[in-house]
Amino acid sequence: MYAKLCAAAPDAEMAFWHRDCDLPPTFQSWFTVANLHTWMLAVRFRALPPPHGKEYVQGLVDHFFLDIEDRIRAVLQPPSKPTEPYTLESSFYTNPNAPTTGPDGKAVRRRAAPERLVSRQMKIFKEQWAGMWISLDYAMVKGDMELAAAVWRNLLGARGAAGIAFPDPNDPNAPAPYRRTVNLVGGLVENIEKIDFEKEAHRDDGSGVHDYAPFEADKYVKYPDLMLDVVTYLRRELVRLENISDEEIMHGDIPGLGFGRIVESTVDASESSDATKSSGAPPTGDAVKSSDVLKTTPSKPSKPSTSEATKLTATSNTSPLGKPKNGNSPKPRTSKADAASKTSGVKSLPSRSKVTKPVTP
């Protein structure tokens, strides 16, 4: 499921993320988008009857980080010859160290990064994964304003948090100032008390996500609509996944689980509505209007709704992410990925990194 749904999601809507959200074609951007869709699928898995919900979420996270490690090694420790990826090739980001051949037709050998650098990157992505899931879980329960804020922080780089810079009318040729939001998560900042935030905000961290230059200030105008589109997409997809029965999910009905388009065109919405009327079937997530999604969340007696499942989790003896307070949370079984592979049918990749893999929410 992970390979065909979550890993493929960034490439499926590549134009939206690159053009509308101005995300650079980097692996960091790919990770953020893939993490978003992995979270949506995990929200539905949590509502599965025990013990299946816990096992499905565990397997999903195991596959996610096996894929992350495989892609990190392809960039930092590139092989001399092309190798088969853990899931699939992605054109969402560019690998500067992809295997190439020289003028003589022989493979060009590239220097490999030390293992400690791979472990460090895995730790950074682990913290980003946990932080994003916590913020989205909290926002899903609190409301759409909080969800829009989570989208702005995690997907849009919190652009404009320190204010919007406009062109100087007295000096139109002045150099464009550089500013970004300082991210304290991910192990990049070791001593927060000693950090100079103003100096750090003007230092390029190489992520490609930073505030717009003064001559691009008009791009902020589209941010409310952009956040509304993403929030509506999240709500619509969560409702659609909720309407899929537990039996379909556990039998691996991957076509039925596939994510829809982020921004639905008028033609797509009308065709979906006509198809629903002619078949007499209840409306799917693609046919639900955004206003209806935000007002009503249908539920079934056979399982709790996704929002109810999260609320119940938050008020029971577990944390908001489903992690038991008594410390008996499921440990990542990356080294036993063959068991997780039975869920999605993806071949397992032995982990060579010494970094501690994440505990599933």
Image (cartoon, grey):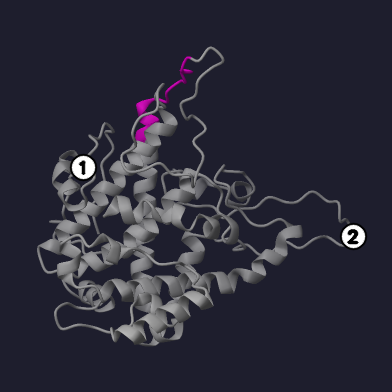
Residue 325 in view: no
| Along the line of sight, the residue nearer the viewer: 99 or 78 | 99
Judge whether 233 appears above or below 31 on screen. below
Counting the numbered discs, the total is 2
What residue type is disc 1 on? Thr
Q: How many residues crowd around disc 1 within 10 Å: few (fewer than 14), some, or many (20 or more)?
A: many
Left or right: residue 353 compared with residue 143: left
Q: Quadrant of residue 275?
A: bottom left
What residue type is disc 2 on? Asn
| Secondary structure of residue under mark 1 | helix
Judge whether 88 appears above or below 250 on screen. above
Residue position for label 1 = 334
Alpha-carbon span between mark 2 and mark 1: 59 Å
| Along the line of sight, the residue nearer the viewer: 82 or 176 | 82
Judge whether 89 appears above or below 79 on screen. below
Residue 105 in the image, given as x and y percentages of width and height: 50, 15
| Along the line of sight, the residue nearer the viewer: 184 or 134 | 134
| Along the line of sight, the residue nearer the viewer: 85 or 310 | 85
Which residue corresponds to the image point at 30% horizontal and 45% vertical from the top-left? 65
Residue position for label 2 = 170
| The C terminus sits in image quarter | bottom left
